[in-house]
Structures are given as structure tokens and as C-alpha cells.
Amino acid sequence: MSNEQQSVKMWSGRFREPLDREFEQWQRSIVFDWQLLNEEIAASKAHASAIAAAGILTADELAVIRGALDAIAAAHASAEGKAQVRDHASAEDIHHFVELSLVERIGSLGLKLHTGRSRNEQIATDLRLYVRRQIGLTINSLAAWAHALVGQARAAGEAVMPSYTHLQRAEPVLVAHWLLAYVEMILRDAARLQDCAARLNHCPLGSGAVAGATLALDRTIASRELDFTAPTANSMDATSDRDFVLEYLQALTFVGLHLSRFAEEITLFATAEFGFVTLPEAFSTGSSAMPQKKNPDLTELIRAKVGRIHGAAEAVTLQLKGLPLAYNKDMQETQEPAFSAGFVPQMIGLVARFTSALQFNRERMSEAAQSGYLNAMAAATYLVHKGVPFRTAHEKIGNAVRYALEKGVELNSLTLDELRSFGDEFSEDFYAAVSLAATLDCHDVIGGTARTRVRQALDAATARIAALSQEVAHAGA
């Protein structure tokens, strides 16, 4: 390619003066939108099919153009090839790069491809394809993490741990019940991402720069080829819509929040003060100063990543605020935040493997679940079954707890005579009612930690995760 060819802009006909050199470099987006190469190739091939159907290209020309586009993609599939795209000397953006490469391969025929098309609709299409692909990768990773959690939950069996409110011990729960709480978060996250994917899945190609293509294009051709649901309904909205980028990043913020909550709990539970879990060495590091340390680097980094994701969503919010219709150059700035969240599928994949490698100290967790009056709620429920109003039962058990605290024993260590000093309703069956098994099983409601309910929840979660994986596989087929 000659220097003269390289210097030609896609819009330069109206201009006499060259761009300020520093401004030219500063405003180029190829340094980040090179990541859209595959999306740009796919969209260009679809557009070629549409203009061929409109009589702009012959069948032979269409075959040549599509073949050359495939060759460009193949030539830049490696890390070295991608770097060549990013570091291209003169391409303004990924669209310009593909056009220059196409002309280099097939000559002036390559210039026909832009007939009936604007870069405004190109970037709107490429970004939708990119976000759709990233959503698929993210949901796949979420399914893997959910599967790891269910695996640990099944392995835990009837192991128990304390649950917490206000970071104070509350009631005993099955370890499996705690793990399944995160599965519920994951499934909501996946549903949000699926909703986003459904809303974005409309094809902007054929929208032109703002008012629609100037050729009588059959827009359904490109839409079908790219597996969109349908063409977009309004050209002005299509070329200026970045709702899907914001919605995607907001959905990822929820993913990050849930990852961060899990990371925080594991970080706490791995401390000597809790001692509930043993961190896998493959995901931990040591201290350069203190030889005994094993640091939870993975969970600490995960806690921090949510700020990066949320920051990207906030950036796009402010970039879109107050923009008049339709396309504005400001929208170029929505790309980098979208790309900056590209690490999320890999991060979730790491968490999935980390989760599978966690070791739980069941004895320590069980001891913690059976001390500190965690059966007090079950004790109050016992009195309710004896006909005592709950508020009264709450007061009586609270008094019993205070007495046990002063004596330094648990509720079930109080004698029957001591218990009856707080109410005549206490009898020998109290001790069975506040045993660990009974304390768990009194929560015998949908979503409760009763052992039979958790077994049912495990089976249901397994089926829901399998269905999610099938949906993603079908969507990517």
C-alpha cells in the first residue's frame, strides 16, 4: 500500500487542509476499537450480501469481497496480527482499517463495499455484536461458578455453620444453604444479562448516517446473517443508541457486587479468627517479609474489581447524558468502558476454579453453629407451639439467654427447673426442640435451611444451571 493510499481519509473530499498531526493521532480510535475486528468483518460480510441483493455487486464480486474479508480476519487472528491492527500507521478506526486492507487485497472493488453504509451504523452494529458475544461468555462463566458452588454444596452434605446478621451469629444453617444463596445471585445476574442481550439484538445496518440507507436495501438480509432478531425500527435511534452498553455494564456491576460479597466472606472465613475455610495455595500468595503468611490475593482483587466495573458504567452514563440526536463523536468514548469490562468472564472462571478448590473446616464451623445461643429462635418457636404469643415467647427466651450468659452455659444446658423459672410451658421435649437437627429443620419452608428443603433446593439449582447452560449453547449455535 502506497503512502498516498494510506493517507486518504474516508471523508477527505470536502477538505483542503490536512489535520493537525497531534489532533489526528489523539482522535483515532483504532488504538482500542481494533478489538472489534471480527465484528467488523462479520458486519461487512452481511452488508455485502445486502448490497448484492440490491444489485450493487455481482455474485462474483460478492464472493471476492467476502473471501477477502475472511482473509483479513485470518491474517490478524494471532496476537501478532492483532497488534498490527492496533498499531496501524494511518487507519482512523477499525472500519477504516478493514477498508484499507480490503482495497490492498482486491483493489478498487473494495471501495464498493461502503455503498449504502455509514460508519455510524457500522459502529452501532459492531458494538452490539461485541456486547452480545461478551454476554454469552459471561453467562458461561457464571454457569461454571454456579456449578462449582453446587458441587461444594453437595459435598458439604449436612455440615452446618452459623449464619450472620450484622456480622453477629444468628442461626445455624447448612453450609449448602449458604452456598446456594450465591447460586441464586448468579441466576439473577444471568437473567439480567439475557434480558440485555434480548433488547440489544436488533440490527442497525441499513440505518445510514442518520436517516436510513439511500438504497432500497432489504435490511432483513444482514439482520438474519448476523443472527439478530430483526432490523432496528428507527434510524436515528439505531445510530445513536448506546443503552445496551450501559445496560450491559450495569448488569456486570451486579455480577461484580455478588462476586465481591462472596470474596469478602471467604476473606473473613479464612482468617484465624474464623478458621472456617482453608485457602487453596494455587490462588494465594505469600509475604515478602513474613514467612508464615498465606494471603487471599484472589478474593482481595475481586473485591476491588467491582469499582472498575461500576466506574465504567458511570462513565457511559455521563457520556450519554444530554446528547442530542443522533450520532455524536462523544459516543466514541463509550467503547473503552465496554472493552474495559472484558476481563469479567475470565475473572468469574478463576472464581469457579477457586471455589472448587476451597476446603471447609467442618468441625470449626459446626462448633461455631452450636455456641452463642443460635437456637434461641427455635426455643421461642417451641414456646409458640405451646400456645405462647410470640412476643411473650421472645421475652421469655431473652430472659433465659441472659441467665445462661451469666451462668456461662448454652440454653440446652439449663436444667428444666431453671427453664421453668421463666415459664411453666417448658417440659422435657424442649431439649429435642432446640437440638441442632431440630433447629435446622424447624425452618421447613420453601427457601429455608431445613435439611429436606436444602436437598430439594440443590436438585432445583442443578436443573436451573443445566437449563441456563443449554440456553447459552443454543444462543451461540
Image: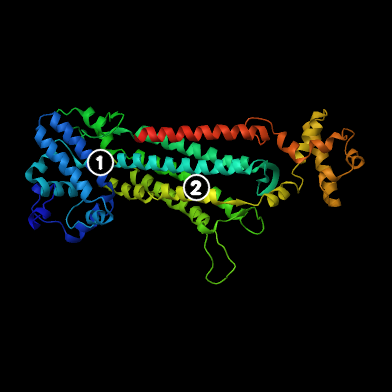
Residue 17 % position (x, y)? 10, 55
Asked if 445 appears above or below 436 in the picture, the reply is above
Q: Residue at x 58, y 39 (%)?
A: 180
Q: Which residue is mark 1?
A: 327
Is residue 56 visible to the viewer in this orientation of the structure?
A: no
Label 1 Cα crowd, 10 Å radius (few <14 / some 14-19 / many 20+): many
What residue sits right under mark 2 in the picture? 352
Kind of residue sitting beneath label 1: Tyr
Residue 273 rendering spot, x and y as whole percentages: 67, 58
Label whose residue precedes the other's in the sequence (2 or 1): 1
- Residue at image coords 70%, 44%: 170
Mark 2 lies on a secondary structure that is helix
| Vertical relation: 471 (above or below) 413 | above
Q: Quadrant of the C terminus?
A: top left
x then y, percent, for residue 318: 37, 47
For image coordinates 82% across by 44% down, the residue present is 411
Q: How many marks are shown on the rendered structure? A: 2
Q: Is residue 146 left or right of residue 194?
A: right
In the picture, measured across the screen, residue 385 lies left or right of residue 186, that is right
- Residue 5: % across, % down: 9, 53
Residue farthest toward the front in the current orientation of the protein: 155
Q: Residue furthest bottom?
A: 289
